[in-house]
Image (cartoon, rainbow, N blue to C red):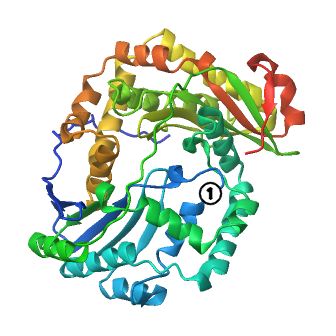
Amino acid sequence: MSSFPDPPAAGTIAPFSLPAAERNTLDSGLSVISIPSGSIPKVYLRLVLGFGMASENPSEIWLTQLLSDYLKEGAGDLDAVSIANEVGKMGGHLNVTVDDTTTTISASVLSEFAPNLVRVLAKIVREPLFPESELERLIADMLRRLDLARSQPGMLATGAFLQSLYGDHPYGRFLSTADLIKQFTTAAVRAMFEGHAGPQDAKLYVAGQFDEAAVLDAANDAFADWGGNAGSVKPPQGVTNERSLFLVNRPEAEQSTLSIGLHVPDPQQHDYVPLVVTNALLGGSFYSRITLNIREDKGFTYSPRSQVFSYPGAAYWVESADVTTNVTAASIHEIFFEIDRLGSEPASSEELEGIQQYVAGNYILRHATPGGIIDQLEFLELHHLDEQWAISYTDQVLALTTDDIQRIAEQHLQSSDMRIVIVGDITAISEGLLQYGNAIEVHP
């Protein structure tokens, strides 16, 4: 039998520091954050607008996704092909994405083209065309994406889980409907953009190798007279945690898709970083307790995972897993067993040390690229945190004790307070779920 030497001991985590960022506010109100970094002659630009899916009203779910598709379809004297060609000649590709709170236009190009890319980004937000001729095609694309999303049990589980957490608040809206999408118009897209896109809450991030003076000159010129409204979403108020059980029926499904979780402290709260480490130990890493239990030991699932998700002023923890239908109730039992065990007895110092090295090391690795650096700065801006929060992150992680982890689990991860969402065959699984309360069938 082959034998392998023991792995080397983990090294000491190096002190972390963010690259120096220069911040300038243009006359229009746009903030420009410049971060010289790296040695490769490329530059990454990201223009972040301060609105996203949470700015939609109940009759507009996914309208901002249509808007993000539309922003690539032309601006000023450039049509969609011309925009793609312009950015392509610079060595890049234009991306437009939307999430709950932001709409982002970005590209990575060769360093000497940074001022040119600034002008293209400015044209897109100042002179979007929203051509009527493209609406039918874009709507058809959205309907195909909706059909795909609604065929995936993970998407249905996420939709039902968010709705259970946030109710009628925009954070609780996840999946649109065909009827809503078919009613979207170019006028509605333009109204959404003009009502929410403006320089006052926008940020232009520039990271990599570039001529800082030339980029700032280009930004001052290109965004000089950009105006518009600032959009904001109030965080949910009065959220509570309580045990509840929600079922989404998929007749004859071979698997049940689970989403189990609750509200937790957001990044502005003192317990957020300890919670991230607790999550990694409990279910957020391959060698976490829940994963070792229901995957490695019992074989109930292949890829369980827990995560902490955050919005401005809100956050939640969730354990997700696809389990074989006949072990649905047993899987929930084992997940709760591991959650309760962590809150009732401390982890070993060896177990915690390994998780601390994992969390701190991954945190440092995420800052190895210009895009990763921008991700961190954007996170700080979104949650109104200063750079010291990021600089001290690894120190906070490494300073935690086993008692800290036990306290977090006991205080913030009570299984009796968790919502349970299951997408599966209700007929096959209902009897085993009686111990978790009365089930409510939902249709996300």
The residue drawn where x is 68% and y is 35% is 299
Sort mark 1 into few (<14), some (14-19) or many (20+) by Cα contacts within 10 Å: some
In depth, the one of 223 and 380 nearer the eye is: 223
* Residue situated furthest top in the rendering: 344
In percent of width and height, residue 125 lies at: 38, 72
Whole-percent x, y for residue 186 in the image: 59, 74
Residue situated in front as seen by the camera: 419 or 367: 419
Quarter residue 296 falls in? top right
The answer to whether 226 appears left or right of 194 in the picture is left
Q: Secondary structure at mark 1?
A: loop
- Residue shown at 46%/45% (left/top)? 233
> Is 162 located above or below residue 419 in the figure?
below
- The image quarter containing residue 204 is bottom left
Q: How many marks?
A: 1
- Which residue is located at x 52 percent, y 21 percent? 413
Q: Nearer the viewer, residue 144 or 252?
A: 144
**Vertical placement of residue 56 versus 122, above or below:** above
Look at 32% across and 54% down and name the residue there: 201
User: Three-letter amino acid code at disc 1?
Assistant: Glu
In what quadrant of the picture does the C terminus appear? top right
Q: Is 307 situated left or right of 385 in this image? A: right
**Nearer to us in this view, 378 or 344:** 378
User: Is residue 113 visible in the rendered structure shown here?
Assistant: yes
The vertical placement of 228 against 56, above or below, is below
- Above or below 129: residue 333: above
Whole-percent x, y for residue 32 in the image? 21, 61
Q: Residue 24's x, y, as percent?
A: 15, 59
Residue 366 visible in rendering = no
Quarter of the image for residue 172 reads top right
Q: In this rendering, would 424 be left or right of 238?
A: right
Query: Which residue matches tag 1?
Result: 60
